[in-house]
C-alpha cells in the first residue's frame, strides 16, 4: 500500500514537473507607463488562472516602436504580444502582420469596447488590437487661478476664450504661466498637439489628392495663434516642452491651464505628486466654431504578431488584460482612479468609477474625437493627430522640427510652413502618392 | 622666487584640473543624487541639491520590478566576451601590420576605420534577419560577435599604434644576442606589449558595456544587458526620472568602479602616442 502511495506521489510530482517544464511562456513587449507597470505587478493573477508564464520587455515609447517594427517587419518572432498604438494598428493590419482578433470569447464582450477605440484599432472592420487603455486630450485648469482672474471656464470653450483666460491668469512675478502646451519636436509630442489643434482651425495634412496643405490659410492661422498665445502667456522655452515638462510645471503650480492627454488627470489630482491636486478643473479641448474640437484620440493596445507560435495563449492573455475583470482587479488593488481608462463602455456606466472627478470629461473627450472624420474639410486619411500611413511618422517628425524652430524664434512661421510644404510634398512624391 | 611661481602655477593647474573634473563628473553626480530623491523632488524647480529627504525607495522599486543580476551578468559576459574575442583576432593582425608592414597596410587600416563611419541603423535589418534565421536573436553569442566586429577596428588601431612604439633597436639587440623568434616574442615583445594590450582591453570593455543600439535591438529578455535595463525606465509620458536615475546608477556603478581601479592603464591607453 505504502509503495503504491509513494508511486502515485512520485508520478504526480513527475507530472507536475513535466507540466511546469512544458508551461508556455509569452514574451510581451510593452511601453513604460504607469498602467502597464501596474499590469506587470498583477500578472500573477493570469499565471494562476492559466498556468502561462509571462516575460516582459518594457521600453520607452520611441525605442519600443523601433524595436517592434523591426521585429514584425522581418517576421523575427521575438514577441508573442506587442503593445502598439492607433497609428500602427491599421497599417500593420492591412499588411497582414497582425492576427485578427475577430474570434474573442463571448465572455470577453468585444461589443463593450468604445466604438471610437474599436474603429481606430481596426482595418476594414476587423479588430487587430484590443485597447488596454484609451485617451483623448482635454483642458486641465487651476480653478483657484480662474476664479482669481474673474472668469468661469465653460465646459466646451473656444480658443479665443482660452487665449483671454491665459493672459488673465499669467503672473510672471509669481512664476505662473497662463497656459502650458507641447512645443517639443517629434510627431508624437508637439506634432500631435499642433495637428489636433489644426483640425479645429480647419487645417489638415493632405487634400484628397495627397497634396500637402501647409500653404493654406488654416495652417498659418493655427501656427500664428499658437505662437502668439504662447509668447504672451506660455512658459519660457516652451518650444522644447513635451508632456513630462508640462506635467512637472503644472504639478508645481506654474501653469494656469494645460491641454494634454486625459491620462494626465490622474497625475495632477494625485496629492502625493501634485501641489495643486485639490484645485484642478477639467473642460473639453477648445474649438473655433468650425465643428471640430482640438482633442486627439489614442489607445495603447495589445496585438499578436502573425509570426507568433503561441497565438492561442496570446489571445488568452489579451482577453485577460483588456477584460472587465481586469478593471475590477485593479480597482480592488489600487483604487478606481487607477484603472485603465478609455477602453470599455461599461466602465463609464459604473457608478464607482463615475465618482472619479475626471471620468465624465475623459469619456466626453473620447466620444468627441472621430478618427474616421477628424478634419473640417474632407481628407483622405484616418487618424486625428496623425495620418495612418507608413510615411507619416518620418514626415511629421521633420515638419514638427521646423515648427519648433519657429516657436523658438529661429525662423518665422511663414518660413516653417514653406519648409513643411516642401518636406511633405517631396516625401509623398517619393512614396508614390502624388 | 622661481619656486613660489612654480607652486602657484601648480595650485592653479590643480584647481583647473579639479574644476574640469567636477564639470565632467557633474552629470553622473546629479544622476546619483536624483536616484535618492522622490519623483516630486527630482523635477522640482529650483532643483534641490543636497538638502532633501534622502530615500532608497527608487532602488527598492527597481529591484522589485527588474532582475538586476540577470542584466548585470549579461553585461559582463557580453563586454568581456566581445573584448577577449576581439583581442584574439586583433593582436595577430596589429602585430603583423606593425612589425611587417606592406605597402597596403595604411590603406587597410583606413578601410577598417571607415567601417565605423556607417550608421548602425543602416545594417540593422540584414543583421536582425541573419540573427533571427540562425536562431541567435536574444542570445549572448550574437551580441558577443556583433559587438566584437563593431569594436574590432578600434582594437586593431589601438594595438597597432602601441606596437609601433616598441623600438626596433631592441629587437635587433636581442637578435645580436642570439635570441630566436620565439624568444624574441616571449621575452622581449610580449612584456613590452602587455600594458598596451591591458589598456586596450579596459577601454573596449567600457565601449562594449555602453553599447546601446545593438544590445537593445538584438535582445528580448534572456540576453538583455544593463542598457536594456536602463531603457525600460525611460518614459515620455509619466515622471520616472528618479527611478531612471536609480537604474542608471546601478548600471554604471560596476564600470565606474572598474574604471577607478584601473585609471592608470586607462590614462595610458587614452594618451599613448601623444607624448614621447
Image (cartoon, grey):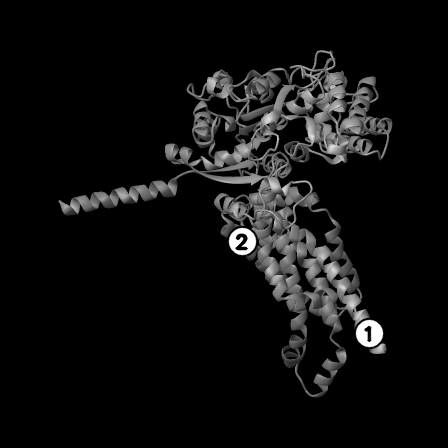
Locate residue A238: give its quadrant.
Answer: top right
Q: Which mark is residue A72?
A: none
> Is residue B76 in sight in this rendering?
yes
Q: Residue B101 location, x and y as percent?
A: 76, 69
Locate residue B202: give its quadrant.
Answer: bottom right
Quadrant including the C terminus of chain B = bottom right
Q: Residue B117 location, x and y as percent?
A: 75, 51
Task: Please state the chain letter of the residue tagged with numbered disc 1 in the rendered image.
Answer: B
Task: Please state the chain letter of the residue tagged with numbered disc 2 in the rendered image.
Answer: B
Quadrant including the N terminus of chain B = bottom right
Seen in the image, is B14 located left or right of residue A372? right
Judge depth for marks 2 and 1 and give the one in front: 1
Residue located 62% across and 49% down the image: B51
Residue found farthest to the bottom? B177
**Circles 2 and 1 on the same subunit:** yes
Q: Gap between marks 2 and 1, in whole Å?
A: 47 Å
- Count of marks overlaid on the render: 2
Tell me the residue that label 1 is attached to: B6
Under tag 1, what secondary structure? helix
Tell me the residue that label 2 is attached to: B72
Give the camera-side residue of B62 and B228: B62
Amino acid at each position: 500500500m505504502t509503495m503504491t502511495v509513494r508511486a502515485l506521489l512520485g508520478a504526480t510530482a513527475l507530472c507536475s514537473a513535466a507540466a511546469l517544464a512544458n508551461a508556455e511562456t509569452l514574451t510581451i513587449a510593452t511601453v513604460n507607463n504607469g498602467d502597464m507597470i501596474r499590469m506587470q505587478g498583477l500578472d500573477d493573477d493570469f499565471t494562476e488562472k492559466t498556468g502561462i508564464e509571462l516575460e516582459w520587455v518594457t521600453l520607452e515609447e520611441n525605442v519600443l516602436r523601433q524595436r517592434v517594427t523591426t521585429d514584425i517587419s522581418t517576421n523575427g518572432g521575438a514577441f508573442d504580444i506587442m503593445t502598439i498604438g492607433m497609428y500602427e494598428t491599421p497599417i500593420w493590419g492591412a499588411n497582414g502582420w497582425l492576427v485578427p482578433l475577430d474570434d474573442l470569447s463571448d465572455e470577453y464582450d468585444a461589443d463593450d469596447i468604445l466604438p471610437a477605440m474599436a474603429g481606430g484599432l481596426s482595418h476594414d472592420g476587423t479588430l487587430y488590437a484590443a485597447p488596454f487603455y484609451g485617451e483623448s486630450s482635454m483642458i486641465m485648469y487651476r480653478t483657484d487661478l480662474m476664479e482669481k482672474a474673474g472668469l468661469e471656464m465653460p465646459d466646451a470653450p473656444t480658443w479665443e476664450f482660452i487665449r483671454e483666460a491665459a493672459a488673465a491668469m499669467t503672473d510672471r512675478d509669481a512664476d505662473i504661466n497662463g497656459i502650458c502646451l507641447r512645443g517639443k519636436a517629434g510627431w508624437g509630442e508637439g506634432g500631435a498637439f499642433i495637428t489636433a489643434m489644426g483640425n479645429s482651425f480647419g487645417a489638415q495634412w493632405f487634400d484628397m489628392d495627397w497634396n500637402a496643405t501647409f500653404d493654406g490659410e488654416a495652417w498659418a492661422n493655427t501656427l500664428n495663434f499658437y505662437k502668439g498665445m504662447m509668447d504672451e502667456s506660455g512658459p519660457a522655452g516652451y518650444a522644447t516642452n513635451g508632456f513630462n515638462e508640462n506635467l512637472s510645471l503644472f504639478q508645481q503650480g506654474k501653469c494656469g491651464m494645460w491641454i494634454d492627454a486625459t491620462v494626465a488627470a490622474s497625475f495632477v489630482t494625485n496629492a502625493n505628486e501634485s501641489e495643486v491636486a485639490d484645485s484642478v478643473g477639467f473642460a473639453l479641448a477648445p474649438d473655433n466654431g468650425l465643428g471640430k474640437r482640438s482633442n486627439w484620440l489614442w489607445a495603447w493596445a495589445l496585438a499578436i504578431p502573425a509570426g507568433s507560435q503561441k497565438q492561442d495563449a496570446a489571445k488568452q492573455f489579451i482577453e485577460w488584460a483588456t477584460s472587465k475583470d481586469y478593471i475590477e482587479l485593479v480597482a480592488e488593488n489600487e483604487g478606481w482612479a487607477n484603472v485603465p481608462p478609455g477602453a470599455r463602455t461599461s466602465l463609464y456606466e459604473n457608478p464607482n468609477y463615475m465618482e472619479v472627478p475626471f471620468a465624465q470629461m475623459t469619456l466626453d473627450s473620447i466620444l468627441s474625437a472621430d478618427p474616421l472624420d477628424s478634419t473640417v474639410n474632407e481628407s483622405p486619411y484616418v487618424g486625428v493627430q496623425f495620418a495612418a500611413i507608413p510615411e507619416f511618422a518620418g514626415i511629421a517628425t521633420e515638419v514638427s522640427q521646423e515648427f519648433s524652430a519657429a516657436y523658438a524664434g529661429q525662423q518665422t512661421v511663414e518660413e516653417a510652413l514653406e519648409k513643411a510644404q516642401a518636406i511633405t510634398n517631396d516625401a509623398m512624391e517619393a512614396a508614390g502618392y502624388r | 622666487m622661481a619656486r613660489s611661481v612654480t607652486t602657484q602655477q601648480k595650485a592653479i593647474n590643480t584647481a583647473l584640473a579639479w574644476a574640469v573634473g567636477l564639470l565632467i563628473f557633474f552629470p553622473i553626480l546629479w544622476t546619483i543624487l536624483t536616484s535618492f530623491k522622490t519623483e516630486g523632488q527630482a523635477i522640482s524647480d529650483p532643483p534641490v541639491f543636497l538638502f532633501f529627504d534622502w530615500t532608497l525607495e527608487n532602488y527598492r522599486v527597481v529591484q522589485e520590478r527588474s532582475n538586476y543580476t540577470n542584466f548585470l551578468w549579461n553585461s559582463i559576459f557580453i563586454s568581456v566576451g566581445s573584448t577577449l574575442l576581439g583581442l584574439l583576432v586583433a593582436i595577430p593582425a596589429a602585430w603583423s601590420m606593425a612589425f611587417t608592414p606592406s605597402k597596403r597596410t595604411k590603406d587597410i587600416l583606413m578601410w577598417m576605420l571607415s567601417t565605423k563611419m556607417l550608421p548602425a541603423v543602416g545594417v540593422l535589418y540584414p543583421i536582425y534577419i541573419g540573427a533571427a534565421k540562425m536562431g541567435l536573436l536574444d542570445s549572448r553569442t550574437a551580441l558577443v560577435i556583433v559587438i566584437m566586429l563593431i569594436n574590432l577596428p578600434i582594437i586593431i588601431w589601438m594595438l597597432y599604434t602601441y606596437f609601433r612604439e616598441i623600438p626596433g633597436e631592441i629587437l635587433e639587440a636581442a637578435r645580436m644576442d642570439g635570441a630566436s623568434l620565439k624568444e624574441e616574442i616571449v621575452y622581449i615583445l610580449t612584456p613590452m606589449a602587455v600594458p598596451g594590450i591591458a589598456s586596450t582591453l579596459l577601454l573596449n570593455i567600457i565601449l562594449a558595456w555602453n553599447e546601446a543600439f545593438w544590445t537593445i535591438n538584438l535582445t528580448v529578455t534572456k540576453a538583455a544587458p544593463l542598457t536594456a535595463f536602463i531603457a525600460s525606465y525611460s518614459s515620455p509620458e509619466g515622471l520616472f526620472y528618479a527611478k531612471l536615475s536609480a537604474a542608471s546608477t546601478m548600471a554604471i556603478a560596476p564600470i565606474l568602479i572598474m574604471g577607478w581601479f584601473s585609471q592608470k592603464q586607462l590614462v595610458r591607453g587614452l594618451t599613448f602616442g601623444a607624448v614621447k
